[in-house]
Amino acid sequence: ASTLGAAAAEKGRYFGTAVAANRLGESDYVTTLNREFNSITAENEMKWDALEPSRNSFNFSTADRIANHARSQGMKLRGHTLVWHSQLPSWVGSLGSASEVRSAMNNHINQVMGRYKGQVHSWDVVNEAFEDGSSGARRNSVFQQRLGNGYIEEAFRTARAADPDAKLCYNDYNTDNWSHAKTQAVYNMVKDFKARGVPIDCVGFQAHFNSGNPVPSNYHTTLQNFADLGVDVQITELDIEGSGTSQAEQYRGVVQACLAVSRCTGITVWGVTDKYSWRSSGTPLLFDGNYNKKPAYDAVLAALGGS
Ligand code: G3I
């Protein structure tokens, strides 16, 4: 296979990218997207502020453009994200009581998952609910403050009922290194959910790496240990700061770690081209600003068994 998507498919995986709807008019962008990738995540368009800017008033038009693109190209669609403290419209934080926050959260999940029912293969139901650092504590979000620890479980139960066929994922960053407290905290939550029958199908590893946060040597161990709990694992927002051979080698290591875990079902990079990366000063992706393939691209394709 000569493209990322086709090579990954031969390994039984998908290879996706984040997409920004406002780039879908750029021909080089679309050409590269359609040629190389077979799964799409909306970079911002399926977040709460974009979809429900005021209470129970939904605007799906921009998200639909991404969903329609995926469908028309026969690509999979990842859903990102239903319950997150960031890119959350201020009205949610202004709700007067726990029961209002609860009903807003559940309504948001029901409406959004209902809209894309049958189209989204995996949803990031809850994103980034844990603190960084050594505490392993829950992040102090609106949901955590008002609803307490049980909000994550409630979100997953609501999501299962809203679209029983979608895979339900917990997604986070800085959970790549097995020895980190945050990784352990997420692991313990998933273990508890599986033990109590709380519906969870997958764990997303964002995988935003840089020189201060390189791909850890125990990455494969982390992915395998989560998979051994009985969930799929997915690499959901991969990007790696750097350039040249060293960047390529790190990308190779990530792909090899995923392929070594049978329940690692797919990889998504967080953007098509360095030109539009959220890391405005960086070059963390597989195509440069002119849509040329970088050494990192060649390493990923080779690791997937393509050429
Ligand atoms: O849409 C507005 C536009 O109207 C306004 O004029 C402009 C001015 O700054 O801002 C635009 O919004 C920006 C938005 O991206 C859409 O482009 C926000 O400022 C900007 O903060 C936002 O950044 C996004 C970031 O999430 C926000 O949290 C990045 O594009 C997106 O790549 C990034 O993605 C996150 C994942 O969702 C979760 N994991 C981490 C990852 C990287 O931060």
Image (cartoon, rainbow, N blue to C red):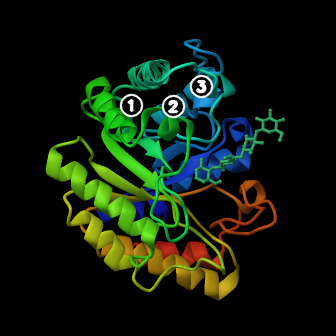
- Name which residue lies at 49% across and 63% down: 3
Name the amino acid type tagged 1. Answer: Gln
Residue identifier under label 3:
92
State the SS at label 1: loop
Q: Residue furthest right?
A: 281
The residue closer to the viewer here, 224 or 148, is 148
What amino acid type should be assigned to the residue bearing mark 3? Val
| Disc number placed over residue 67 in the picture, else none | 2
For the point 64% across and 16% down, the residue is 54
- Circle 2 packing at 10 Å, graded few (<14), some (14-19), many (20+), is many
Residue 65 at x, y = what percent? 59, 28
x and y percent of residue 159 in the render?
Answer: 33, 31
Distance from label 2 to label 1 (Cα)? 8 Å
Q: Cβ–Cβ below 8 Å for labels 1 and 3?
A: no
Q: CA distance from mark 1 to mark 3?
A: 27 Å
Residue 151: image location, x then y, percent:
39, 36
- Which element carries disc 2, helix, strand or loop? helix
Mark 3 neighbour density, 10 Å: few (under 14) some (14–19) many (20 or more): many
The residue indicated by pointer 1 is 119
Where is residue 61, by image quadrant?
top right
As drawn, 193 above or below 183: above
